[in-house]
Image (tube, rainbow, N blue to C red):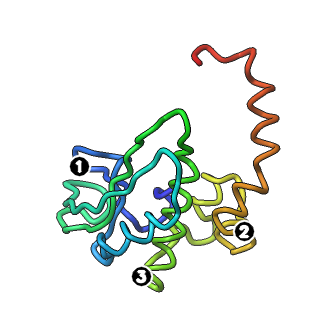
Amino acid sequence: VFEGTNLSEGRGTTLPFQVVGAPFLNGAELEKRMARHHLPGLHFRRTAFTPTFSKHQGVLCHGVQMHVTNREICNAFAGGLHLLETVKNMAGEQFEWLGKTEFFIDKLLGTDEFRTGKYDAAGLIEAYRQPVLEFSEKVKPYELYK
């Protein structure tokens, strides 16, 4: 979901899609705020990195690295959405959605309800819990890997 924002998702580092940050973030504060979510099976650790390409190329970014501590109980998507919401709230006007008339985040999430504020992270997850479960059951016969 970070691809739809002005945050670096770690492209151009040795940890793409594991780290999230930007020059305008405070990694220590972000780490503290993420710990308050008590997300099962996930831990967020402050980090700093300088992407060699992509967003913020050559600029020191501060943020967090998401660690899966228990893959059986974690919901990485929920962790990412809560992280996005927390960063958005922390960064204020420095945070940007990418797009002019069509926002990439809406395509990534399949809805504009998060970007427009209809749902916060917890609300969006809950609103789509049943449809996601139904879809998961529907596609089970076609799964190649469990």
Look at the numbered discs 2 and 1 and tell me whether their residues touch, using CB distance below 8 Å.
no
Q: Secondary structure at mark 1?
A: loop
Q: Secondary structure at mark 3?
A: helix
Q: Which residue is mark 1?
A: 13
Q: Position of residue 66 (x, y in %)?
A: 38, 51
Q: Residue at x 27, y 73 (%)?
A: 23
Q: Residue at x 46, y 86 (%)?
A: 93
Q: Position of residue 25 (x, y in %)?
A: 33, 75
Q: Position of residue 27 (x, y in %)?
A: 30, 70
Q: Residue at x 56, y 48 (%)?
A: 77
Quadrant hosting residue 85? bottom right
Mark 2 surroundings within 10 Å by alpha-carbon count, few (fewer than 14), some (14 through 19), many (20 or more) = some
Kind of residue at disc 3: Gln
Query: Marks 2 and 1: which is nearer the front?
Result: 2
Query: Is residue 75 found left or right of 93 in the rendered image?
Result: right
Residue 94: which numbered mark, if any?
3
Q: Residue at x 48, y 35 (%)?
A: 71
Q: Which residue is mark 2?
A: 119
Closer to the chain start, of discs 1 and 3, is: 1
Kind of residue at disc 1: Thr
Q: Report how far apart the C-alphas of labels 1 and 3 lie in the structure.
A: 22 Å
